[in-house]
Amino acid sequence: PPDGDPRWADLADQALILAREIQFRGYRDPEAVPLTQSEGMVMRYLQDHPGTAPSQIADATGLQRANISAVLRGLERKGLTERRSTADDLRRATIHPTEHGKRNYALVRQEWAAAVAAAAGHDTDGLNEALALLYKITGGLTDSRPLAPGRPAALM
């Protein structure tokens, strides 16, 4: 690693494994609607940003604009989002989570929490510090995201 500390690579590796293990479990509650990784990113974003234009969702989530339409159609078919025309331009649409979409997000978060807490033996020592570090890393990665997926032109 650039700063000489291999723990950063270990942290990244563990984060990827953690995400995969959470997804692999699926959901116990039959009401939970499973989502693809891209659908999950969009739903997560829409919880705090309802009424966002598709192009803004693509930019915020790092999804390619060419792919966002397919992701949004999938979420609409599942009843989790709805497209609304804007009052000033009927050709322009914004995306909103439906009540079902909001409930589903809350439900899957509860299931993730239960799985992660059980895996940690319900030990909360260091949880606040871990969350603070993960929020900092997530923000830093999001802020330095390349314009297109793949390799950035230069690492910071």
Image: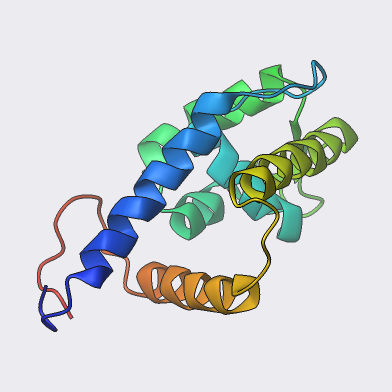
User: Hey, which quadrant is residue 11 in on the image?
Assistant: bottom left
Colour setup of the view:
rainbow
Residue 154 visible in the picture: yes
Quarter of the image with the N terminus is bottom left
Q: Is residue 76 above or below residue 138?
A: above
User: Hey, which quadrant is residue 108 in on the image?
Assistant: top right
Where's residue 111, x and y in %?
73, 37
Residue 90 visible in the picture: no
Q: Is residue 1 above or below residue 24?
A: below
The residue most toward the right is 99
| Identity of the residue drawn at 79% across and 15% down | 30
Quarter of the image with the C terminus is bottom left
Where's residue 138, x and y in %?
45, 68
Q: How many marks?
A: 0
Instruction: Return the residue nearer the eye: 106 or 86.
Output: 106
For residue 22, side relative to residue 144 (left or right):
right
Where's residue 120, x and y in %?
60, 52
For residue 98, side relative to residue 143 (left or right):
right
Q: Is residue 45 above or below residue 42?
A: below
Instruction: Return the residue nearer the eye: 14 or 155.
Output: 14
| Identity of the residue drawn at 82% across and 51% down | 87
Where's residue 99, x and y in %?
89, 37
| Identity of the residue drawn at 79% across and 34% down | 104
